Image: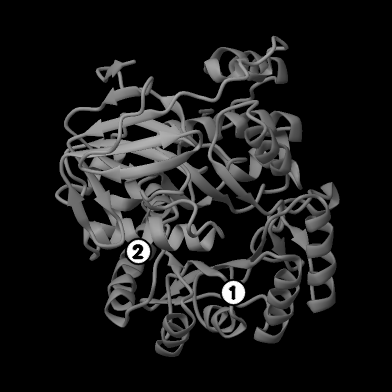
Amino acid sequence: MLKAHRRTSIVGCLLLLAAAAPARVAMADPAPADPSPARPIVLHAARLLEVDTGRLVAPAEILIKGERIAAVGSAVPHPSGATVIDLGDTTLLPGLIDVHVHLFLHPGSEDLQTVEESVPQRTLLAMLAARDDLMAGFTAERDMGTEGAGSADTAVRDAINAGLYPGPRLRICGNAIDILGGHEDANRFNPEQHVLSNATYANNADELIAAMRQQHKEGADFTKIYQTGKDDLRDGTLHTPFQYTAAQLKAAVDEAARLGGSVAVHAMGEPGTLYAAQAGVASIDHATQLSGETMRIMKEKKIPAVPTFAVFEYFAHQPGPGAERELAQLDYKIKEFKKQIAAGVPFAVGSDVGPFAHGTQAREFRLMVKYGMTPLAVLQADLLNGARLLGWSGQIGELKPGYYADIVAVPGSPLDDISAVERVSFVMKGGMVEKPRRDAVTAP
């Protein structure tokens, strides 16, 4: 990934893409395709996780036909001509899900990269980021805003869907939406320079709906709204102004439903988090401070909180004058998270990766366990709630017949050591091996 203030030319990015793209890019070759159906694949491993029950099946086999799972169990049929891949002492899991990523960000100064780097350059870097996330085992993601690159994420999603480049299944939103002077506006720059906001302006319900319709026209799957900011920790309590009322957010939620999508909010604390819950948003991301009433509504409406500990930890350990403030916010967040667990708030797993390196975000699982959840609860939050949040329940998130063959292998058992998800050795997406395990035994 890029370091702070370092620029990469468009030509350099094209060379990086050409060098980094795996063999599957050959799908664009004009040679006629083999008209015969793909050979069935049987994956064999020491274990697999039944996500809904928490049961480990040992030994484990999965039969894949085309892009779907055909059979799962300790032993499955081995059709004539099937390719058998023995993954050894690993546990098979559904492909991991990250419901809060920023493909258009990389480590370094966020404000400067969004100003200095062109949208084409950022789009090429986003393709590399998508590949890195897939190689880390994330087969489905929700991109939570291009940070000023508009609808460029539509091109990234469509290129992946067309098989032109490897990456996760994506839900995308284009720019996030913000009020004038809000959380992601260019507030610290010289006004005479007319630096653009990293979000799309909408100051009332009518403007929210107009912005959503434009983004839907440009390919957005859902809407991301900044609901709180700027954040301030005073006397041990988080203070953060809200940006939209409950009624304004409800108008956005209703419009999203009409368009077949949903609304996710960046919301750190009260009363903005309460207004978001009252409006019935799909998720409350960051969710550092939730009142008792907010947690009650979230539990009742099954609105997941997305803690994003990984990005908080990252900034808390960066050198500089803001480190002490960031560490204090992380400590506050941990205490509030324990209250949310006790209250029965549902969770989904999102890392906010982008400010830190893509492909490293599985640390989010370890942090959620460290701060109070069991490994199984975190995996279920990720795979079951994540699939539901992305609108792919019954398609991804479990190893069951009929589901997409999005499958990863990790060493040992993640129920004993959740950090196993940080060491994914095999990745399959839609029946295609994206990352082969080096020591796997493959037989025709």
**Of the residues under marks 1 and 2, which one precedes in the sequence?**
1
Mark 1: amino acid: Val
Give the percent coordinates (x, y) of residue 21.
Answer: 56, 18
Q: Residues within 10 Å of mark 2 (few under 14, many from 20)?
A: few
- Quadrant where the C terminus sits is top left
Residue under the point 61% across and 34% down: 126
Q: Nearer the viewer, residue 399 or 131?
A: 399
Which image quadrant is residue 330 in?
bottom left
Give the percent coordinates (x, y) of residue 329.
Answer: 39, 64
Give the answer, above or below, for where 7 lies relative to 108: above
Mark 2: amino acid: Ala
Find disc 1 in the rendering and name its residue: 281
Give the answer, above or below, for where 90 lies relative to 349: above
Find disc 2 in the rendering and name its residue: 328
Q: Nearer the viewer, residue 53 or 426?
A: 53
Image side of residue 443 versus residue 248, left or right? left
Q: Nearer the viewer, residue 127 or 1?
A: 127
Q: Residue furthest top?
A: 31
Give the percent coordinates (x, y) of residue 336.
Answer: 33, 74
Give the answer, above or below, for where 275 lies relative to 321: below
Give the answer, above or below, for where 210 lies relative to 47: below
Residue under the point 48% across and 31% down: 132
Image side of residue 369 versus residue 102, left or right? left
Which image quadrant is residue 236 in?
bottom left
Give the percent coordinates (x, y) of residue 275.
Answer: 59, 83
Secondary structure under tag 2 reads helix
Which image quadrant is residue 45 in?
top left
Image side of residue 134 versus residue 225, left or right? left
Separation of disc 1 and disc 2 at Cα? 28 Å
- Cβ–Cβ below 8 Å for labels 1 and 2? no
Q: Residue furthest front?
A: 80
Residue under the point 52% across and 62% down: 389
